[in-house]
Amino acid sequence: MNLSMSDRAILINAIRDIPDFPKPGIIFKDISTLLSNADAFGVLMRHLHARYSSYDLTHVAGIDARGFIFGAALAQMLGLGFVPIRKKGKLPYTTVSEKYSLEYGVDEVEIHIDAFSGVDKPRVLLIDDLIATGGTAYASANLINKVGAECIEACFIMGLDFLSGQSKLRDLVEVYTVIGVD
Ligand code: AMP
């Protein structure tokens, strides 16, 4: 299921670039303008629904915090449950965690130990708004596998193609980006 050129243009035009946020040299991809645009949000969600309706998934897992928005909406459209993967210290029940490196220092993501319980062979789609270095997504896909599920694909609304994040993640899981950013 390919995104048409006109739909691609609608999505690109709905995402706002904020230079030097949160620090100098970073161009922040602001998806709030896409979310507030019902036509563009609809184009995106229908595209994701069409792509993933044949994947035989059992859950969608979203990465804290923007992955929750797309992930929860998609899970409902597909008739599936949604699982949050959160930054350390936010989930209330027993968690499994995974550390990953940042440019300076380390960060950690967590998932509830029983996130996929009650399903025999959980087949999970991982989703976030953007992949940059891929560290967050790599740790998140590992978490899904650690708690006994299979991460079928990692999906991002945008991929920063000039960074090597996607190729590293592809060693672990299939990767799909709706829009590549040069
Ligand atoms: P990474 O682990 O480097 O792939 O970073 C991915 C996470 O950081 C995602 O949750 C993104 O929301 C956020 N992020 C990284 N770079 C940007 C950017 N240029 N614009 C918006 N969000 C970003």
Image (spheres, rainbow, N blue to C red):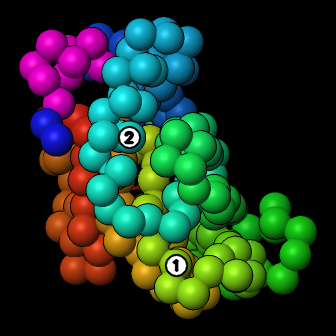
User: Residue at position x 44%, y 41% from top?
Assistant: 129
- Which class describes the residues within 10 Å of circle 2: few (<14), some (14-19), or many (20+)? some
Left or right: 53 with respect to 89? Answer: left
Residue in view at x 13 percent, y 23 percent:
4
Tell me whether the residue at label 2 lies in contact with that at label 1, contact meaning CB atoms closer than 8 angstroms.
no
Out of 47 and 105, give the one closest to the viewer: 47
Q: Quadrant of the N terminus?
A: top left
Q: Nearer the viewer, residue 120 or 109?
A: 120
Q: Quadrant of the C terminus?
A: top left
Q: Earlier in the sequence, mark 2 or mark 1?
A: 2
Q: Can you say whether 85 is above or below 176 in the image?
A: below
Range of the magenta residues? 3-11
Q: Looking at the picture, which amino acid does disc 1 mark?
A: Pro
Type of amino acid at the residue the image marks with label 2:
His
**Numbered circle sitting on residue 85:** none
Secondary structure mostly seen in magenta is helix
- Would you name the residue on which mark 2 appears? 49
Q: Is residue 114 magenta?
A: no
Q: Tell me the quarter of the picture where residue 89 sits.
A: bottom right
Residue to which mark 1 is pinned: 122
Q: Residue furthest left?
A: 5
Work out how far the residue at label 2 is from the one at label 1, CA to CA, in angstroms: 19 Å
